[in-house]
Amino acid sequence: MPSTNKRTKQEQQLDDNDDDNNNNKDKFQTMQVDESLINKAKKIKSTDKRLIVVLEQANLETIKIGKVYELLNCDRHKNHLLKYKRDPNSNARPDITHQCLLMLLDSPLNRAGLLQ
């Protein structure tokens, strides 16, 4: 019998702790955000002019070399390009595409969120 009383005391303590936690929740207020401000921010973002950049002829192709795939590069894979009867001085220049993307990501337009 004494063990039952001890258990009920522990349960009562847990219940008391739960009540204290619920009372603490009532003490904190949630911050109310004005819906008009949210809608205004969405409208500004949707009406901003954006610059869309299309990199034409910026092909990124992969080629299987052994067991791994590599980006096709006209400097490193001339034999493979000749094997498939393609121009060895073709558009297989991933380094130029990479530099263009880096420059665009570092541009002031991108930092302002106006680049798409």
Image (tube, rainbow, N blue to C red):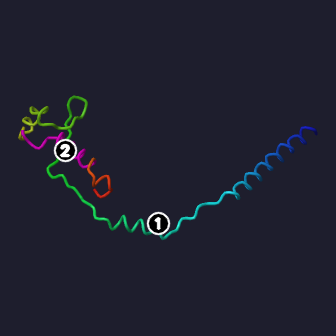
x then y, percent, for residue 6: 88, 40
**In front here: 74 or 69?**
74
The secondary element bearing badge 1 is classed as helix
Drawn side of residue 104 relative to residue 31, left or right:
left
Quarter of the picture containing the C terminus is bottom left
Name the amino acid, label 2: Thr
Drawn side of residue 35 relative to residue 29, left or right:
left
Residue at 15% from the left image edge and 37% from the top image edge:
73
Quarter of the picture containing the N terminus is top right
x then y, percent, for residue 46: 35, 66
x then y, percent, for residue 92: 13, 41
**In front here: 59 or 110?**
110
Numbered-mark total = 2
Instruction: Estimate the spatial distance between the alpha carbons at disc 1 and disc 2, rounded to whole Å.
Output: 38 Å
Q: Relative to 24, say whether 81 is above or below.
A: above
Q: Is residue 84 magenta?
A: no
Q: Nearer the viewer, mark 1 or mark 2?
A: 1
Answer with mark 1 or mark 2, whichever residue precedes in sequence. 1
Pointer 2: what residue?
97
Q: Is residue 94 magenta?
A: yes
Mark 1, Cα crowd under 10 Å, few <14 / some 14-19 / many 20+, is few
Q: Which residues are magenta?
A: 89-105
Query: Mark 2 and mark 1 in contact (Cβ < 8 Å)?
Result: no
Extreme residue toward the top, this view: 66
Drawn side of residue 101 relative to residue 74, left or right:
right
The secondary element bearing badge 2 is classed as helix
Residue at 25% from the left image edge and 44% from the top image edge:
102
Pointer 1: what residue?
38
